[in-house]
Amino acid sequence: MKVELKDLEFGYDPKKPIFTGVNYTFEEPEFICILGPNGVGKSTLVHCINKILKSTGGAVLIDGKDNKEMKLKELAANMGYVPASSEDNFPLTVVDTIMVGLQNDAKFGTKKEDLEKVYDVLNLMSIEHLAMRNFNELSAGQHQKVVLARGLVRMPNMVILDEPTSNLDVRHQLEVTRILSELPKQKNMIIIMISHDINITAKYADKVIMLYGGSIYAVGTPKEVITKDNLRTVYGVDADVIEINDRPHVILNGAIREE
Amino acid sequence: MAEYQRYTRRKLLFIVACVVAMVLVIGYAATIGSSNISFMEVYKTIFNHFFNPDAVDPDADWAIFTIRLPRIMAGLIAGMTLGVAGAAMQSMMKNPLADPYTTGISSGASFGATLALGLGLSFAGFGGSMSLVLFAFVFSLIPAAVIILVSSLRATSAATMILAGIAVMYLFNACTTLIKLGLSDASLASVFNWSVGDLSAVTWNDCGIMVCFTIVGTVTLMLMSKKLNILITGDKNATALGLDAHKLRIVLLILISLMAASVVCFTGIIGFIGLVSPHIVRMFLGSDNRYLIPAAAVFGGVLLMVSDLIARVILAPTFLPVGVITSFIGGPIFLYLLIKQRRSAW
């Protein structure tokens, strides 16, 4: 699967675009993390890829076809999504919650192969023991793993994750990010994850896209992108960046750079 | 996987149990009346009526088919429609307080009925009760039309739709109150009787019209039940799964409004069934719309038939409005189940 962002632009007010001129191509099965400060347009950018938002300029080409010309169902067939938070006003069991990821058709019953796919993904996430629990009875970590499983259950070519670890403790953040980082090799998937945790991103990401100033500010390996200068410019913080196992590691000095 | 399959079988068993209860309640309700007809005679008469006309007891047949069954069937069909419409409305609005009247259908219907009853207006040449039905039906759809118009101007959320419904409801209630101020005591009494819900005036023809809406609506909603399951996970997730949440919500709104309007115009406003039936069913089956919708249909039908049965016998020979009884029965049952439930259903 090849996803090309060509001069992509989006703004709720056309005179004040959130970002402009975003160019990037997702092609290789990789674990790509998007970093950037709040309000820079990380979620907006990924929402333009899966048409939750319609871009106001440029194009998103999916295997050469503009996503504006594609039906939502066609787009969804190859693209999974994990939202930042999941609504659970009427909770289903964990199996049924994950099954929702397979169910956009008019057939009434549960197909055996669908049930098998659900149990496969439960196994992948190591949460088979939660199968018959109610979604709203789970802890935040379990909750997030189930939402992740729902995004993965179709085994799409690309999965977009909007801050999937934001409500998790550090152990669960590491666990979920590790699982995601293994998927490109295991399942040949492109994984795009928005993250606020720079060190976890640095530890697991294959590529990092750093957004700032209404466009892509830096892109490359974690080592190339997570640098002292970039952190100072993008986040406005003074931090030391050391190397651990050939990966950058950020030590915050507590100093916030004055504007 | 075996555990999930057992869980599914338990859900089907619950629906079968509700269907059995429905058949028993129909039989028992048909025994109540001035002619003494036993429980078994009811089924025998119904069987003979359709399959063995030579063996029909004319008195029993007349009592059951002319007097009792139209009312019982009205309760069953109206209860089913309200139960299904309530379940679908709660899922599409992602709101446990939503019911078939959330979009202002009841206030629109009340206004239409008040115009017909109070001012004696006729609709397109129809007179009397038919005019009332048509007024109530047409006006009950106006709030939904306003919501769809507002939604079309800008893609709106479920919460905006509910708020638009409330705005229209207040507007219609104000108009109804204005008209009521000028009505005579007799007209006011007619308006009141209509507004509290009553099944006694429903005929076989009315049942025929209602059942068409019920069948078409229920089958369509059952086919859309997986989409409703997607909708309850949030609009962004729905879009990512290939659903246009906004368009789907408008289609559902039209369908549910037509279903609720088809009931309210014949029976008046019967509250609580549409709100409570889906919740009681959820406590047993969970929130999966594939099972919730058929189960809420059967349970809603049973609940309304039982309520009407009590309305007929509790102060016999005086009949109480069924709307009062649905709240008296449904309220305590619902509170009891809320306290006793082991799993959180919403």
Image (spheres, grey):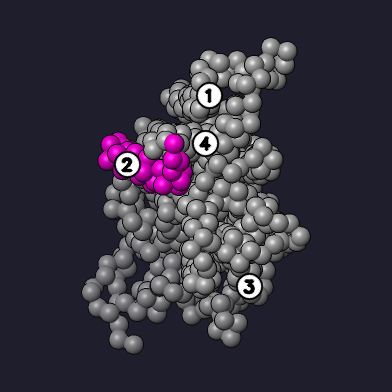
Name the foreground residue: A113 vs B282: B282
Q: CA distance from mark 3 to mark 1?
A: 58 Å
Residue B240 lies in the magenta stretch: no
Question: Depth-wise, is mark 3 or mark 1 nearer the camera?
Answer: 1
The image's mark for residue A155 is none
Q: What is the chief secondary structure element of the magenta stretch?
A: helix
* Element assignment for label 1: loop
Q: Which residue is mark 1?
A: B35
Count the marks: how many?
4
Question: Residue at left 66%, top 65%?
Answer: B121
Question: Depth-wise, is mark 3 or mark 2 nearer the camera?
Answer: 2
The answer to the question of whether label 3 and label 1 lie on touching residues, with beta carbons closer than 8 A, is: no
* Element assignment for label 3: helix
Name the foreground residue: B133 vs B327: B133
Q: CA distance from mark 4 to mark 3?
A: 37 Å
Question: Residue at left 58%, top 18%?
Answer: B43
* Element assignment for label 2: helix
Among the two numbered marks 3 and 1 on one chain, the one whose residue lies closer to the N terminus? 1
Among the two numbered marks 2 and 1 on one chain, the one whose residue lies closer to the N terminus? 1
Residue B327 lies in the magenta stretch: yes
Q: Which residue is mark 2?
A: B332
Question: How many residues crowd around disc 1 within 10 Å: few (fewer than 14), some, or many (20 or more)?
Answer: few
Amino acid type, residue under disc 4 in the picture = Gly
Name the foreground residue: A15 vs B194: B194
User: Which range is magenta?
Assistant: B317-346
Among the two numbered marks 4 and 1 on one chain, the one whose residue lies closer to the N terminus? 1
Question: Depth-wise, is mark 4 or mark 1 nearer the camera?
Answer: 1
Q: Which residue is mark 3?
A: B153
Question: How many residues crowd around disc 3 within 10 Å: few (fewer than 14), some, or many (20 or more)?
Answer: few
Q: CA distance from mark 2 to mark 4?
A: 18 Å
Q: Which x, y percent locates residue A198?
A: 36, 63
Q: Are marks 4 and 3 on the same chain?
A: yes
